[in-house]
Image (cartoon, rainbow, N blue to C red):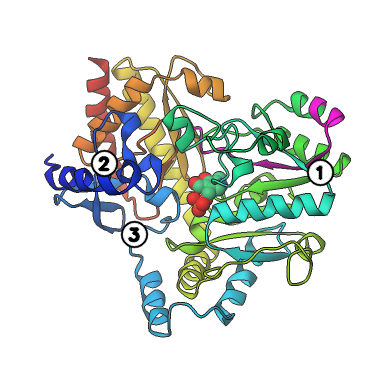
Amino acid sequence: MNYKNSKDIFEKAVNIIPGGVNSPVRAFKSVEKEFPIFVKSANKAHLMDEDGNKYIDFIQSWGPMILGHNDERVIKAVQAAVLDGCSFGLPTKKEVELAELIISMVPSIEKVRLTTSGTEATMAAVRVARAYTKKNKILKFEGCYHGHSDSLLVAAGSGLLTEGYQDSNGLTEGVLKDTLTLPFGNLEKVEKLMEKEEIACIIVEPIPANMGLIETKKEYLEGLRKLCTEHNTLLIFDEVISGFRIAAGGAQEHYGITPDLTTLGKIIGGGYPVGAFGGKREIMDMIAPVGDVYHAGTLSGNPISVTAGFETLSILKNTPSLYTDLEAKVDYIVEGIYKLSEKYNVPVCVNKAGSLFTIFFTDKKKVETLEDVMASDTTKYSKYFNAMLENGVVVPPSKFEAHFMGATHNEEILNETLSAMEKAFIEISK
Ligand SMILES: Cc1ncc(COP(=O)(O)O)c(C=O)c1O
């Protein structure tokens, strides 16, 4: 592949934007590529870069593009909305309609507030939890990522793991003291900690997807629910990724567990900037202007984002078969990966949930903890990434992220992907 234009753009970018990118994982650093591809356009399951290369896309904007890029129904709705004006700083009917739709789909949400990003949603949810419980400390799990507000950048996953650290620099001692962390999946440790610490909330990705994908056991989430109820601690499900991806009602519907608060993002904006947090009425009514927990935003509930989100969620709600299709496609690819693994003697463990999967290059039969993830082979992942790119498939540029399957990945595209994977496995086996 020729990447000349991307390289030239990156050389310019790197002098004027830190690292040349506006979100670290885009830099391709951890997969040993000097510069990223710069995307010019996208359509359905494909991306086109500035050099005219065409790729099958398994990043899907890190989740939002579940319907594929440029879904005609979403575009049509957005085009109409744009002509009505793009931001008013006053409420619109569409915000109310989206709120209604979210409430109808996510079992635990009785009231919801829109934000501009997932980061704002988790930040505000933690603030409300502190106000509601009158406690300061929060508990999060190592390798889970909840956006980049200070208190959630401790022992974090995603781009931080990719960059080789977990606590961001620039956090105060107070923040570090108030954010308690434990390994994901160990209920006993949570139980012990809660006996001695007063904790406002446990925030968790019910299906972690930011240390690579981890398959969650239902009993673990049930255990967290029980402990939170016993200790007057709020349970926050961060469903920014799992929401509308694992099922139309997110992981909470899939597992039948009711968190006190839920944070959302990505899909609810249909590719435009958005986030949301919601939950029990009595908790949500602590937020200004009803209560005195402040949350605001010039672009919160932006009319264009809300329109794209409403259209996307409506389609998801009205097409339940979409989820079984997505899962079947993931199963097909995962089965293919295990066959290649055997054929070329490249041991892997593939974790999957709904429309998400991660390939770990490892001898382990199960990858269940951050430790297991860390022990998987980074060099092999880099080879995999680069071979896939050369063969026209963009996969996550980090072993700590998930592959995202979309509605427009058809049989032909899946078979093309498996052919590219075969070439990647041959490369790795050398
Ligand atoms: C689980 C989770 N929570 C929160 C966020 C932050 O969302 P945003 O990037 O929209 O700020 C992310 C982003 O990837 C996420 O994966």
Q: Amino acid at mark 3?
A: His
Q: Residue at x 82, y 54 (%)?
A: 132
**Contact (CB < 8 A) between labels 3 and 2?**
no
Residues at marks 1 and 3, CA–CA distance in whole angstroms: 40 Å
Indicate which disc residue 69 carries. Answer: 3
Asked if labels 3 and 1 touch by Cβ distance under 8 angstroms, the answer is no
The residue labelled by disc 2 is 36
Give the amino acid type for the residue marked by disc 2 in the picture: Pro
Q: Is residue 224 magenta?
A: no
Q: Is residue 297 above or below residue 169?
A: below
For marks 3 and 2 on the same chain, the one whose residue lies earlier in the sequence: 2
| Residue 209 inside the magenta-drawn segment | yes
Measuring from the top left, give residue 223's x and y in whole percent: 77, 35
Quarter of the rendering occupied by the N terminus: top left
In the picture of the structure, the residue carrying the numbered disc 1 is 233
SS at circle 2: loop
Q: Nearer the viewer, residue 350 or 399?
A: 399
C-alpha separation, residue under disc 1 versus residue under disc 2: 43 Å
Quadrant in which the C terminus is drawn: top left
Element under disc 3: loop
Point out residue 117 in the picture as x, y percentages from the top left corner. 52, 57
The residue carrying pointer 1 sits among few (fewer than 14), some (14 to 19) or many (20 or more) residues within 10 Å by Cα, namely many
Range drawn in magenta = 192-212
**Image check: 291 left or right of 361?**
right
341 to the left or right of 130: left
| Residue density around tag 2, few if under 14, some if 14–19, many if 20 or more, within 10 Å | some
> Residue 298, percent across and down?
54, 70
Q: Residue at x 40, y 31 (%)?
A: 335
Residue at x 68% of width, y 53% of height: 125
